[in-house]
Image (cartoon, rainbow, N blue to C red):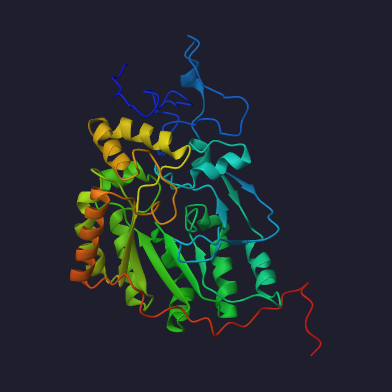
Amino acid sequence: MNRAIPEDPQGPTDVAADGAVTAARRRGRGAASNPSGRFERERRVDFDDGWDGLDELPAFQTSVTIEKPRTIVTRNSSPDIGFDRSINPYRGCEHGCAYCYARPTHAYMGLSPGLDFESRLFAKPDAARLLERELSAPDYVVRPIALGTNTDPYQPIERRWKITREVLEVLARAGHPVTIVTKSASVLRDLDLLAPMAAEGLARVALSITSLDRALSRSMEPRASSPEKRLAAVRALAEAGVPTGVLIAPVIPALNDPEIERILEAAAAAGASEAGWVLLRLPLEVSEIFKGWLLENYPDRYRHVLSLVRSMRDGKDYDATWGRRMKGAGPYAEAIRRRFDLAVKRLGLHRARRDGLDCTKFVAPHPAGVQLSLF
């Protein structure tokens, strides 16, 4: 079947041509294509040679490769990010969010930021051991560690690997503060750790809720928890005494931005204590992957969404400038900000965190292999 594709003045019109994959092979996935990574010298493209070969190719299955990093705590000095260190137990994310800004990192592994990113995953089973070693360093200075900054720590494979759980156990024993961002209700599995930590001022959790529309959410982030389950998780965490926020991340103009007030109202009703938002980010390969998803699922909004995105990004798909990459600029971005701020004020979801996490209760662990002090 042929489909008319809207003109895109910023690039090629056939956004799904590079690495396009048939619907049957990618059922339950977010990306519509599997383009070669930007560092590859060759591009691999599936094509029909007239013998129905594409229909015989297998569906994408999730595979997990063990990764052996030398360290597990990642540092950053970005001035527009509220943390300076993070842990990512996994590389790649099975949630398959079409808009995920972390997709380009798979190119460093010689893989595609498209379907490879959500099906060919990497796990770091030594994370807890490495964390103990790093926390035991004599010069370690305590600041909150963030989980869920690149890929989701509670994506489906966590049920088997339990690496996030092991990391939390180390942090709990050491009295180390932690923040978590996730799209999964599976975070409730670790309530037995998070509730006592929160009582000591050591834990905060944020659920990312991009839409209350089940159809939109299922299409855009196919293997994440449903909106109802995420709100139920907010309620359960809040009732257990865990400070819980909601992130509308990303805000996509003309797609989910009409829901801003409704999402915040539902979050407040569930017991959330704070809220935040991040504008859609389309760095590198994410731009074409998101366009392919948008064209397939909402072709009638394709031009309008991209036009609004570019109006907030100086005419480009993305602007990586610090201070602007998260919120954008221009009249439409300002309107989103004002709508969000008014709703937060009305609902009591104060963006400013009155009480920071407690960094005074930290006691360095001394795992095997770490030399103890003589005195």
In this view, 269 is above or below 15: below
> Residue 264: x percent and y percent?
24, 62
Of residue 326 and residue 324, the one placed in the foreground of this image is 324
The reply, left or right, for residue 254 in relation to residue 32 is: left
Query: Quarter holding the N terminus?
Result: top left
> Residue 178: x percent and y percent?
50, 71
Query: Quarter holding the C terminus?
Result: bottom right
Q: Which residue is farthest top?
A: 50
Q: Which residue is farthest right?
A: 374
* Residue 125 in which image quadrant: bottom right
Residue for point 65% across, 50% down: 66
In this view, 342 is above or below 225: below
> Residue 222: x percent and y percent?
38, 44
The reply, left or right, for residue 113 in relation to residue 138 is: left
The reply, left or right, for residue 199 in relation to residue 350 is: right
> Residue 64: x percent and y percent?
59, 46
Quick check: can you spot residue 62? no
Residue for point 51% across, 38% down: 113
Quick check: can you spot residue 99? yes
Residue for point 33% across, 71% down: 236
Of residue 81 and residue 246, the one placed in the foreground of this image is 81
Residue for point 27% across, 51% down: 333
